[in-house]
């Protein structure tokens, strides 16, 4: 059979497969129905066979190129990305992530680094306001002071909500930046973690002696545990990525990074969920007139949830070793 | 394909679970830049639309703080989750990628999963480093220079940026291509020459590939250059088929192509006789 005859005999099938690809791309699989999906599979197999035999058939180069594209396009419709598998994500976040984090040295390092610098800079700013000036700047401190002069139970609830929106976005971005920059061999993540711990610590230390201090601490008490833990978690996940490039544990650098990636991304998503929960508390409870005991109670409850998550869910069971 | 020399361009070979090998074209940085800018633009349009809607709803209630809060939440989610969510739900495409005919795949050709989609989009922020700062009325506006991602694309294979490297993904071109069919030879002199070729003419695979590539492209090449190109193969074919020394090599390749791909010896003869009788009648 001459090539031109062969092409004529196949052309109709290829055009039909092309049409079905267009239909599938426009999410009409259900509307197309089972017969069309069955036909799609048959045509895909036939196109694969034509491509495999293109050399033997001596098809012209542009036809071969067309077949490559057609098979690729159909392949993308046949093997679709697995949507959000909610059950799998729940299992990942509630079972695998806490077990991994329980053993993770990067979490310990990020925790010590963040809280160590945070507490040290808080003490330094408390003892010497010049330190807070140096780190945050006079204008920054003035802004925080002004914002928290009326942040709790104030008459200007609008300003409080606007401030909440700003800080929610700002702090969650800080946490995710700690994760993202961690891939720069861990150094970027360590820098971001130290910088933010220094900044936040100085602000906390300065506010101890400020006239807006009581309002400030009442404001941050309820959502603080989730928010600060999320920053630590984001930083730890980032460091895990960065360190995996240096310490490959016998894998190639690429394999080591991808292995760390599969574990670090769910941890970063956990951090985002914590930021979301912190934001919810920050928007609803923190600026409200609720008594301080309620806010402190919520903070204790949040700490309890965190301990349950990291220790109770993370504690190794049944001889499992998830050390990585 | 089997036995073919691997092309020195941005094509990548994928083997499907059906054990069929096909190629994708990996998208380069300039194609991806267009999709990236379009996605950024769409994100900002979305944020502004959310802002206007909340302003209309909550502005009436004198609750401008809620407007700022919701706009900030929309800003956060579009900045960090737009790409990840779209690529998970749309089989590796965002709106920008769909418009530019791009798709994200695992580097083994399989579709990406949620962890890859979210992770590669988180790490896009590292690819945008270093940032330049633009000062407007004493406030600093950060501008990403995309240098790290660009550098990584050229250093690492398959134009993978840092996020792609970590996630094991690549961006390929995924756009419909036209089927132009088989090139036809219309010159009467070439058809006449085809009748002088042996009846049992058979061309091997590599010769067939060379002939079809030549005939498809010859009309885009200047005549002098065409003859020069055709002479390399034409001289050998002329000797093989004992044709006169003044044979036009360009037409000879067309004639061999016509006999191999389009028509048999008797069909060619019928065509030529038909053409002649038509000419006599006229």
Image (cartoon, coloured by chain):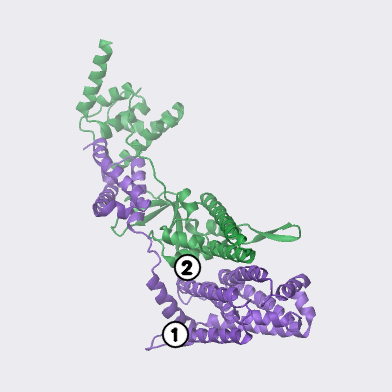
Callout 1 secondary element: loop
> Which chain does the numbered disc 1 sit on?
A
Chain A, chosen colour in render: purple
Residue appearing at x 65%, y 79% in the figure = A219
User: According to the image, label 2 marks what residue?
Assistant: A254
Could you tell me residue B90's position as x and y percent? 42, 57
Could you tell me residue B281's position as x and y percent? 25, 11
Q: Quadrant of residue B124?
A: bottom right
Side (left or right) of B259 relative to A177: left
Could you tell me residue B27's position as x and y percent? 47, 52
Q: Nearer the viewer, mark 1 or mark 2?
A: 1
> Which chain does the numbered disc 2 sit on?
A
Of residue B48 and residue A225, the one placed in the foreground of this image is: B48
Q: Quadrant of residue B80?
A: bottom right
Side (left or right) of B214 relative to A308: left
Residues beneath discs 1 and 2 located on the same chain? yes
From this viewpoint, is residue B115 visible? yes
User: According to the image, label 1 marks what residue?
Assistant: A313
Q: Distance from label 1 to label 2 (Cα)? A: 31 Å
User: Against B119, is A225 above or below?
Assistant: below
Could you tell me residue A68's position as x and y percent? 35, 48
User: Against B17, is A144 above or below?
Assistant: below
User: Against A172, is A128 above or below?
Assistant: below
The quarter in which the N terminus of chain A is drawn is: top left
N-term mark: 1 or 2: 2
């Amino acid at each position: 059979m001459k090539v031109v005859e062969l092409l004529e005999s196949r052309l109709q099938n290829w055009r039909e497969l092309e049409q079905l690809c267009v239909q599938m791309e426009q999410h009409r699989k259900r509307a197309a129905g089972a017969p069309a999906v069955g036909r799609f599979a048959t045509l895909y197999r036939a196109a694969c066979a034509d491509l495999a035999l293109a050399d033997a058939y001596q098809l012209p180069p542009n036809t071969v190129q067309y077949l490559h594209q057609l098979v690729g396009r159909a392949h993308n419709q046949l093997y679709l990305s697995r949507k959000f598998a909610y059950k799998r994500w729940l299992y990942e976040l509630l079972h695998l992530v806490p077990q991994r984090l329980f053993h993770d040295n990067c979490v310990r390092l990020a925790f010590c680094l963040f809280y160590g610098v945070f507490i040290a800079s808080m003490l330094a700013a408390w003892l010497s306001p010049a330190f807070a000036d140096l780190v945050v700047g006079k204008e920054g401190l003035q802004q925080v002071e002004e914002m928290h002069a009326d942040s709790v139970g104030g008459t200007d609830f609008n300003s409080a909500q606007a401030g909440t929106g700003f800080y929610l976005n700002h702090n969650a971005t800080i946490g995710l930046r700690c994760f993202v920059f961690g891939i720069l061999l861990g150094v970027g993540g360590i820098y971001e973690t130290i910088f933010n711990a220094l900044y936040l610590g100085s602000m906390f230390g300065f506010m101890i002696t400020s006239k807006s201090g009581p309002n400030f601490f009442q404001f941050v008490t309820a959502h603080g545990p989730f928010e600060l833990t999320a920053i630590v978690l984001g930083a730890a996940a980032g460091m895990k990525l960065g360190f995996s490039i240096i310490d490959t544990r016998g894998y190639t650098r690429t394999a080591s990074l991808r292995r760390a990636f599969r574990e670090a991304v769910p941890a970063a998503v956990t951090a985002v969920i914590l930021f979301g929960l912190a934001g919810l508390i920050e928007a609803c409870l923190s600026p409200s007139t609720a008594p301080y005991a309620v806010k402190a109670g919520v903070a204790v409850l949040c700490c309890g949830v965190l301990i349950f998550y990291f220790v109770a869910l993370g504690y190794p069971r049944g001889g499992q070793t998830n050390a990585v | 394909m089997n036995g073919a020399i691997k092309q020195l361009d941005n094509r990548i070979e994928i083997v499907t679970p059906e054990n069929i090998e096909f190629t994708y074209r990996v998208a380069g940085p300039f194609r991806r830049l267009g999709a990236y800018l379009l996605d950024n633009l769409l994100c900002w349009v979305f944020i502004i639309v959310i802002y206007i809607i909340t302003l209309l709803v909550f502005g009436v209630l004198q609750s401008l703080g809620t407007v700022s809060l919701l706009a900030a939440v929309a800003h956060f989610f579009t900045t960090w989750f737009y790409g990840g969510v779209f690529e998970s739900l749309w089989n590796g495409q965002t709106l920008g990628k769909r418009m530019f005919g791009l798709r994200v795949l695992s580097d083994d050709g399989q579709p990406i999963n949620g962890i890859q989609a979210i992770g590669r989009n988180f790490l896009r922020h590292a690819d945008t480093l270093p940032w330049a700062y633009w000062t407007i009325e004493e406030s600093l506006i950060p501008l990403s220079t995309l240098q790290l991602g660009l550098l990584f694309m050229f250093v690492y294979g398959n134009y993978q940026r840092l996020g792609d490297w970590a996630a094991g993904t690549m961006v390929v071109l995924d756009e419909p291509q036209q089927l132009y069919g088989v090139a036809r030879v219309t010159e009467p002199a070439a058809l006449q020459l085809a009748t002088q070729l042996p009846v049992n003419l058979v061309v091997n695979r590599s010769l067939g590939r060379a002939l079809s590539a030549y005939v498809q492209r010859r009309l885009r090449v200047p005549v002098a250059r065409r003859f020069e190109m055709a002479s390399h193969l034409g001289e050998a074919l002329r000797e093989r088929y004992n044709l006169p020394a003044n044979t036009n090599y360009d037409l000879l390749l067309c004639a061999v192509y016509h006999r191999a791909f389009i028509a048999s010896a008797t069909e060619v003869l019928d065509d030529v006789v038909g053409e002649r009788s038509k000419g006599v009648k006229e």
